[in-house]
Image (cartoon, rainbow, N blue to C red):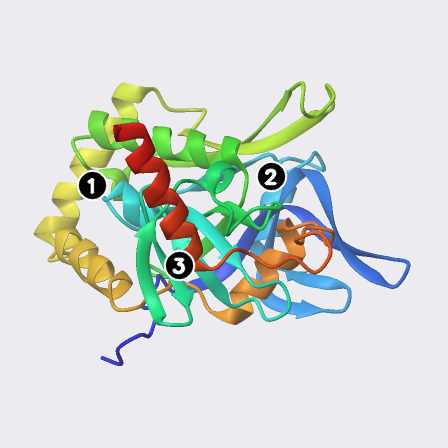
Amino acid sequence: MIKGLAITPPVIGRISIGRMVEKNGKRLPEKDDQFTITTQIQTREGWLPHPLDEALRQEVQGKKLRSIPVTLPFNDPDLNLRAEYTFFERKSGRPLCSGDGEICRRRTDQGLEQLPCPSPDLCEFGAHDLCKPYGRLYVRIGEEDELGCFVFRTTGYNSIRTLAARLRYFHAISGGNLATLPLELKLRGKSTTQSHRAPIYYVDLTLRAEQSMEDAVSHARETAKVRENQGINQAELDKVAHAGLLNTQFEYSEEEGLQVVEEFVPEGSAPPGNAQPQSAQGLSQKLAGKRQANQS
């Protein structure tokens, strides 16, 4: 296996709750109040719709697509939802830093270093709204491709926090059988003080509307046993997927980084004036000084 190559779930399509529009000669993100399922092909007009998008819209009879029946590719919650604080370079899309709130991997003049990760609010390197939580949820839609996934990308705390909680809860109540649990993505709305009471939308993961929790868990356990008897080794799949993620420094390419910057990072997000993000060495020294001051 090539070292440094990200071995991530095969992506055959995208799920979004927004789109890119052109205004005054610039491509800008525009929020939406429904799901859109697309292929991985992008034209000047935007991402091309996936055939499943039209099929699901026919089922809701012209209403907005606000729920999608899905299953998960893995039993491990942390394989289905990948999330960390990430800082992408705006021009190239190159990931410069990625951390979990405790430890980060950062590109510096000395190469890739492991440093403390104080989270975006306390990190001078990722200040000015440059470092954001970045989550990728992998799901399966339909039965056409048993290993192919659709990915929902987000930098929203509401979606990441809700999805992380749901995955862990469902993992617990199903006896670890997440991959055979019938679920659906659901779009929810809320308003906050920060949104000036305007509605904001985030993604939730729930049991399907027509099934009770008892029926869904029973189905998941029975299906897991059937698959095991048929020779499908879900535990080994999870193990291989985990090993693939450890094969690289960063899980995402510069191409993906450019897409994230375009869709989620406001164009005005940049250090003021000619200021640059503080060097990794300077930041680590400052954090060390703060820790010593707190201990004294």
Residue nearest the viewer, comparing 94 with 264: 94
Judge the density around disc 1: few (<14), some (14-19), many (≥20) Cα neighbours within 10 Å: some
The residue closer to the viewer here, 121 or 235, is 121
Q: Can you say whether 200 is above or below 88 in the image?
A: above
From the image, tell me which residue sits under label 2.
59
Query: Identity of the amino acid at label 2?
Result: Glu
Q: Which image quarter holds the C terminus?
A: top left
Residue at the image point whose x is 42% and y is 72% from the top = 109
Residue 98, picture quadrant: bottom left
Q: Is residue 248 visible?
A: yes
**What numbered label is drawn on residue 223?**
1
**Residue type (three-letter) at the residue carrying disc 3:** Gln
The residue identified by callout 3 is 281
Residue 177: x %, y % from top left: 21, 38
Q: Which of marks 3 and 1 is nearer the N terminus?
A: 1
- Specify which label sits upstream in the sequence, 3 or 2: 2
Q: Which of 180 and 261 is in front in this view?
A: 261
**How many other residues sit within 10 Å of disc 3, few (<14), some (14-19) or many (≥20)?**
few
Q: In this view, does 181 lie to the left or right of 251?
A: left
Q: Answer whether labels 3 and 1 touch (C-beta < 8 Å).
A: no
SS label for mark 3: helix
Please say whether residue 136 is visible from this viewpoint.
no
